[in-house]
Image: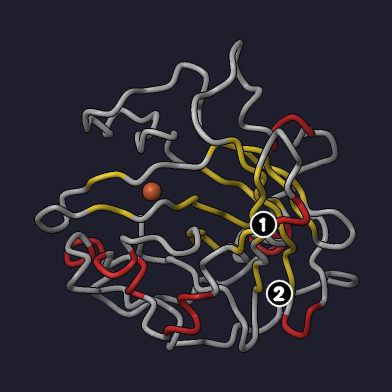
Amino acid sequence: MGGLILPPAYADDAASRPALDHPAYRSTALRHPSRPPIAVPQTLTELTGPLLGDGRVRPTDADLTTQHDGEPLGERIIVHGRVLEAGGRPVPDTLVELWQCNSGGRYRHDRDRHPAPLDPNFTGAGRCLTDAEGRYRFVTIKPGAYPWGNHPNAGRPAHIHFSLFGRAFTQRLITQMYFPGDPLFGQDPIFNAVRDPAARARMVCAFDLAATEPEWALAYRWDIVLRGPARTPGDEDAA
Ligand SMILES: [Fe+2]
């Protein structure tokens, strides 16, 4: 095992981690594990994968507005930020993937059947690798809010799903980024499954005037902190 960098110990953070069974988020009643987790021995496969390889992630993968013949409808935005360790150390070469609905609030997915239009010029998925300073940057369309059947008249605040891979399969963070001042925050059980208000605030990006490109796109900044008191909450049990 010489030279192998093992993942650091994981410090649990119950205040920001959503409960696996969260009654207000109804589908967790059937989805959450009913038995304690089993520790699986970590072998070379778990500790050294995924091996993404240079060149597999292309620069164009980070622009969700140029994946089709025409431009998607909606408000073009830049979403950028840094992936950081506790203490502010940047995390380079991390795979950041995102997926989202279109500007009308509909996903390009067979199970999304609510009556909003699909956009033939928008798939809603992108990815990039963080640079040496831990930076990532996407160009996309601001996602719409959408209804869901959790409770009467339920609507999800606009959000973008994020997945981050570290050096190993066991190092993965899945979470959601929200937009400032969304009127649906108060009735969204997924957002509120993170119990600590300060931790919830860390899932909300900030409007970033300095990064806006005039006459072209507004910008939002969202730093993702993997560990420590400023950790970005994950949605281990959320869709
Ligand atoms: Fe979603």
Q: Secondary structure at mark 1?
A: helix
Asked if 140 appears above or below 204 in the picture, the reply is above
Q: In the shown orientation, is residue 223 left or right of residue 162?
A: right
Crowd tier of the residue under label 1, counting other residues whose Cα lies within 10 Å: few below 14, some 14–19, many 20 or above: few
Separation (CA) of disc 2 from disc 1:
13 Å
Q: Which residue is mark 1?
A: 45
Q: Is residue 159 above or below residue 26?
A: above
Residue positioned 30% across, 44% down in the render: 146
Residue at 17% in and 63% down: 26
Badge 2 amino acid: Pro
Q: Residue at x 12, y 58 (%)?
A: 151
Marks 2, 1: nearer the viewer: 2
Query: Picture coordinates of residue 40 (x, y %)?
Result: 50, 71
Q: Secondary structure at mark 2?
A: loop
Q: Which mark is residue 193?
A: none
Of pointers 2 and 1, the one earlier in the residue sequence: 2
Query: Which residue is rendered at x = 74% and y = 29% of the image?
Result: 60
The image quadrant where one finds the C terminus is bottom left
18 sits left or right of 214 in the view: left
Label 2 crowd bin: few (<14), some (14–19), many (20+), radius 10 Å: few
Quarter where residue 152 is shown: bottom left
